Amino acid sequence: MSQTNEIHREEPALDPVRQEEAKQYARARLRVTFADLALGGLILLLLVFGGLSQKLTGLLTLSAVPEATLYIDVRMVAYGAISATLSRHSGVV
């Protein structure tokens, strides 16, 4: 039987300063993600329980399919505009 030679490579040491910075960036990104989720939940609660959804559909006087499409588009644009600062901050972090 022949033995295979195992080559042991020495791993470079991890820089503790860079590791700490990476942990801080990860925590910041997690906070931004949770803030974005909380904002989305708050907007959803306002739409459902605040009557905002009914007011928005009251403004639309189209047939069902175009009205639903426009309603969803308006909500997506509004949410995108509101959460743009969080998205930008998340990209920086």
Image: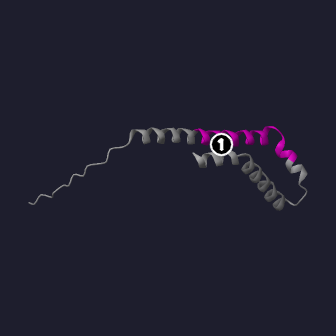
Report the quarter where the C terminus lies.
top right
For this view, does 16 lie left or right of residue 77? left
Residue 42 against residue 10 in the figure, above or below: above
Name the one closer to the observer, 71 or 20. Answer: 20
Residue with the mark numbered 1: 36
For this view, does 3 lie left or right of residue 56? left
Instruction: Reply yes or no: does residue 74 show up in magenta.
Output: no
Residue 33 against residue 80 in the figure, above or below: above
Query: How far across and how far down the image is residue 90, in percent?
Result: 60, 46
Give, as a single range, the part of the protein colored magenta.
Answer: 31-55
Query: How far across and how far down the image is residue 65, in percent?
Result: 81, 61
Instruction: Reply yes or no: does residue 33 show up in magenta.
Output: yes
For this view, does 56 lie left or right of residue 2? right
Report the quarter where the N terminus lies.
bottom left
**Residue under the image location 84 percent in, 40 percent down:** 51
Query: How far across and how far down the image is residue 84, in percent?
Result: 70, 48
**Residue under the image location 70 percent in, 40 percent down:** 39
State the SS at label 1: helix
**Residue under the image location 85 percent in, 48 percent down:** 56
Per the picture, the main secondary structure of the magenta-coloured stretch is helix
The part of the image, by quadrant, that contains residue 67 is bottom right
Residue 82 against residue 67 in the figure, above or below: above
Name the one closer to the observer, 11 or 54. Answer: 11
Q: Amino acid at mark 1?
A: Asp
Indicate the colouring scheme.
one colour
**Residue under the image location 65 percent in, 42 percent down:** 36
The part of the image, by quadrant, that contains residue 46 is top right
